[in-house]
Amino acid sequence: MKSLTRVLIIISATLMFGAYFFPLWHILLDAPQYPEGLELKIWLNGLSGNISQINGLNHYIGMKFIVADDFKEFKILPYVFGLLTLIGFAAAIAKSRRLLWVWFISLCLFAIVGFSDFYIWEYNYGHNLNPHAAIKIEGMNYQPPLFGYKQLLNFTAGSLPDTGGFFVGLGGILAAAALFYKPRLSSKNKSK
Amino acid sequence: MKISPYKLLVLTSTVLVSILASSCKPGKAGSSVDADAAKKVYVAPGKYDEIYAFLSGGFSGQIAVYGIPSGRLLKVLPVFSQNPENGYGYSEETKPMLNTSHGFVPWDDSHHPELSKTNGEDDGRWLFINANNTPRIARLNLATFKTVEILELPNIGGNHASPFCTENTEYVVGNTRFSEPLDNSNGDVPISSFKQNFKGAVSFVKVNKDNGTMNLAFQLLVPPFDYDLAHAGKGPSHDWIFFTCYNTEEAHTLLEVNASQRDKDFIMAVNWKKAEELIKEGKGTKITAKYAHNVYNENSHTATSTMETATQTLDVTKFPGLVYYMPCPKSPHGIDVTPDGEYMAASGKLAAVIPVFSFKKMLNAIDKKQFDGMIAGDLPVLKYEDVLHGEVKKPGLGPLHTEFDGKGYGYTTMFVSSEIVKWKIDNLEIIDRIPSYYSPGHLSIVGGDSKKPFGKYLLALNKITKDRYLPTGPELAQACQLIDITGNKMKLLLDFPTIGEPHYAQMIPADKILKNQIKFFKLEDNKNAYVTKSEKDTKVVRSGNRVDVYMTAIRSHLAPDNIEGIKIGDEVYVHITNLEQDWDVPHGFAIKGNNNAELLVMPGETCTLKWVPGLVGIVPFYCTDFCSALHQEMQGYFRVSPAGSTVPIKFSIGVNPVTE
């Protein structure tokens, strides 16, 4: 394994480690009455932001209250993600291309499972509405977008990566680069 | 027809004379409105004003907050008067704020707002204001814009020369407009015994520099004059405070005439630092005095009223060097210290000049001990010429009050000639004058009484309105003009009506206040004795004929909303906690037929409304502040049964399908 590859792996895994200190994702809500906006920040291990305000508003449409304890993910994620990061470091230390492959595939799986899980939660919150809610609009659901913006009644909902998410995303790109990027002279300078 | 040359001559000369005569009539001053006025006062929708202006409410007892330069009314802050709009002075929590040694006084006459100062500059922490009628000083917290403390002042009548503060808000002062016998003496004396029995008392109220809490540190007993206004020194004059006195004739009837006889009254210069030391050394005399001290705690959202029983006094005649008098022409009103603390401009309201005194000369005159006689036997009067920096000659008629722009100029209101006069401090030359509509009392410049005036704007606060705005019957709006003072010539920018009466104002750049603003109260910090932090904890408790309702409000319901078992003869206390934790979601509360006001409860706050039901039947209650789309649904019922009824206390709210 070349030193460039190892450097890329180390940078990538370090960036991913940053996800412990910054939120991964955020959902922004903007409405005429909320020019300052409301936000829900999603971390590896929990939620932050204007949760009580959002719950206060959601009760009108009968959306289930958002409570961090409902998400088992927040209990498992820090460990799963820690393990992932460790595999990265291990690949660099052991100079193992096989481990690098394992790491990359795990990351891809993590992304697929993660986004699917996120989608399911959003779907459930947006569709499982209490039939006794004060505001009921035929055919309307309140599922926030997976990525990007969507108009939900008077609110514009935006779903976008936050600082931690950017770190992980960048880390993923670097991991891919470590695996697939081959400098032109690579064939004549094989690593030991 | 033939016209004789003689007739023609008569005719032409008549026409000429009348043309001349009419053109000779003294004209009114031309328009002084800035050509760009509209642009300069326009604040685009959604944008903030540059300046907060705090205008006293005068006889309304309140403070009105305006944005400058737009002149938009932002809020009326209740201080000395009950305010049914939000329940101030009606709710159980705020009633103690209006307690005095005379009992509950629901109104006053608030004259002079004073921003707290650090190093002589407005610091945006607190706003003080005096109650003129039943002597008091109030303190408002500028993070919440709430009145958080009111201290009554004993031994005086008419707390007019108040609440001016020293350079670092060490003290705010109060002084009497009506001298009267001290509270602990027998006041049942003939009014004509004024000279023997009446006294003046200058209150020094210590302000805690960390939390602003006030306490009456001491009172100076002074001759029975009428004390009008005051200002503390700064920089070199830090240790001194100056008061204007009129009625040095000591008249007690028809003051209009009898108090206007002397050619000169006085500026009383007090060395407050020395007074403070004397008190520290134990030279004060403790006398009994009864005065209320009311404090509003912003964690418990509850006021308590304590009746104080004594105060320290110093009889100034017994302590040489404490007080000196400077002669000042004709019933002076304002005494205003220049930003550098070197000069004091006094405004004798019946005088033809504005005398400007020099602090340096005052100290020299004191050193030389060449006095122009004594007052009350022992109090030295300094010679007018010895202390005078100079006089602003022919400023206009009826000078009242001066502030400064920090560029070397003073601006003085002329009540009688209805104008503002700009003059230069060093050579006392008049630079410009601008009409005011009509008869200004005080004026206000942003930071104009501080060490570092911000300048830019001047507000003329008028006493007469007449034709300025659309008429509203015999009782008119009050008038106020915004003047641009950035150039050599003053320019009128805006004329806007205010609530009564804009007696005086203080203005401060908005950023000094914005940075401390609180958006809502944290529910977890709520220490109210009757707080209900969750809907689960709501309850109705009877003890004897007292019923306590622990109610919560959140969009869009009050809980509980069906309450039975209330009986005629009960006193019902409804304690409402607003559970919202978001900006700008107050809830209101009102009960049909309640001989009381309503409540406005801020997010995280608890307020209590007392209700004594008078009739048997069903009594609706509801939220009065349009809080949400389902505000009109935010309502409930009391059932009131006859006295002696056996209907049990019962309370409920329907099942909410969507809860945590």
Image: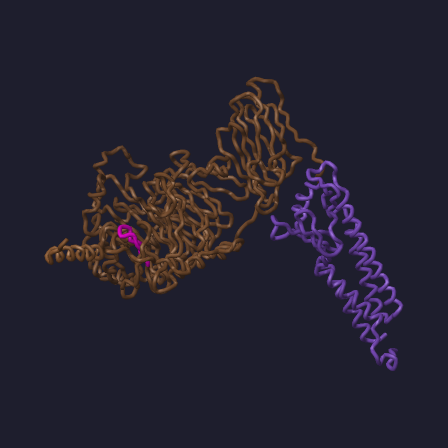
Q: Position of residue B131 (x, y in %)?
A: 38, 43
- Residue A132 within the segment the image draws in magenta: no
The quadrant of the image that shows the N terminus of chain A is: bottom right
Count of labels in the image? 0
On the rendered structure, is A10 left or right of B655?
right
Q: Is residue B611 or residue B524 the one in the foreground?
A: B611
Q: Which residues are magenta?
A: B411-419
Whether residue B576 appears in this view of the structure is yes
Among the 4 quarters of the image, the one containing residue A84 = bottom right
Counting from the top left corner in percent of width and height, residue A32 is at 61, 49
Left or right, B253 with respect to B481, comes to: left
B415 inside magenta stretch: yes
Q: Quadrant of the C terminus of chain A?
A: bottom right
Where residue B540 sits: x, y (%)?
61, 29
Residue shown at the point (83%, 61%) measured from the top left: A108
Please say if B8 is above or below B178: below
Q: Residue furthest bottom?
A: A188
Q: Colour of chain B?
A: brown
Q: Please state which of residues B436 and A1 is positioned toward the viewer in this rendering.
A: B436
Q: Is residue A41 above or below residue A127?
A: below
The reply to whether residue B306 is visible in this rendering is no
- Chain in purple, by letter, is A
Residue toward you, B404 or B130: B404
What is the basis of the colouring in this image?
by chain
Relative vertical location of residue B340 with respect to residue A118 in this rendering, above or below? below
Residue B195 screen position, x and y as percent:
22, 41
